[in-house]
Amino acid sequence: MTSQTTRARRPRPNGVVLRAAAIAGAGLLAGGCDGPQSMLNPAGTEAERVAELFKVMLVGAVLIWAAVIGLAVYAAVVRPGAHPERHASALIVCGGALVPTVILGALLTYGLQLMPSLRAESDGLRVTVTGEQFWWRVRYTTPDGAEVTAANELRLPAGARVELLLDSPEVIHSLWVPAIAGKMDMVPGRTTRLVLEPTRPGLYRGVCAEFCGPSHALMAFAMEVMEPARFDEWLRREAGPATADAPEAGRRLFLAHGCGACHTVRGTEANGVVGPDLTRIGSRHTIAAGILENTQENRERFIAEPDAVKPGVRMPGFAMLPAPDVAAIASWLGDLR
Ligand code: CUA
């Protein structure tokens, strides 16, 4: 069989196949518009404005693109050949200066008038979030001044404006929950501010949006927007000491192996502040800052080999501990609610 007959028999992609591929591709792209981390499916007042701005800019960009392509097609296909110099000069003045100034000026004015509403005052609840290597330190300050420390998860009441104060001790991070609001950098040496107003209860995902080291892409968090009454109840519980029904062994081993030097578990002697507060880690949606499901297996894995899960993490590995000890500690942590 010659290579020519082989080529002749090979099926060519036809119109139907191409159309099916285009539809499948569009479906995949549209699927990316949904989900807990989508700015196109907003669940907060600020994200709604950002999505609106995106749509207006998109329409503006499509119109400009269509006009430019239309002119190119006109010049190349409809009327090829030289054009009178008078027409060319008019095109440069209009198309190069006048029209872009009007369109971009209108888009800029529209964008600027959205900004004051993004700097509004909060309703009293304040949350300080500090970007650590590679996790989030979270401190809630209630309107009556009480402070509650947590980590790697944000819970906020629906329908209230909450002020986030953002900082970082070492490198620049950026906090971004696309479904709730725009992003804000966390800059060493200064405190930045972001006011959020989540509108729809649900579970969303936030990420670090500024390269901060080897595990930048592994620095995320869950954000749960709750009904206000449920949030108040949760915050009240969160402020108290840890409660666990698990066997005492896990707590004893946690303290005996020195975990308390870096981690706080309120209600025990563990009061370290180097690593994340673990007081109610069992009730969190994820562990290791948004990257692992909160299961017994994953907790054991992180305790034994944190660097394998999250390169560059400060926590040393505890793979040298007997497996039953790791399991007991992981089980006790999972029970802290
Ligand atoms: Cu923290 Cu990127």
Image (cartoon, rainbow, N blue to C red):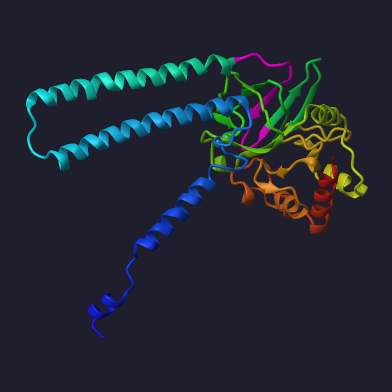
Q: Quadrant of residue 40?
A: top right
Q: Is residue 252 left or right of residue 278?
A: right
132 falls in the magenta region: yes
Q: Is residue 150 magenta?
A: no
Q: Regarding ligand 1, which quadrant of the image does it lie in?
A: top right
Q: Is residue 337 above or below residue 15?
A: above
Residue 239 lies, in percent from the top left, at 84, 28
* Residue found at the very far bottom of the displayed protein: 1
- State whether residue 122 is above or below residue 13: above
Horizontal side of 136 relative to 141 (left or right) equals left
Residue appearing at x 9%, y 23% in the figure: 86
Asked if 288 appears above or below 101 in the picture, the reply is below
Q: Which residues are magenta?
A: 120-136
Residue 146: percent from left, percent from top: 81, 19
Q: Where on the picture, by quarter, is residue 106?
A: top left
* Relative image position of residue 191 (x, y in whole percent): 60, 19
Q: Which is more toward the observer, 259 or 266?
A: 266
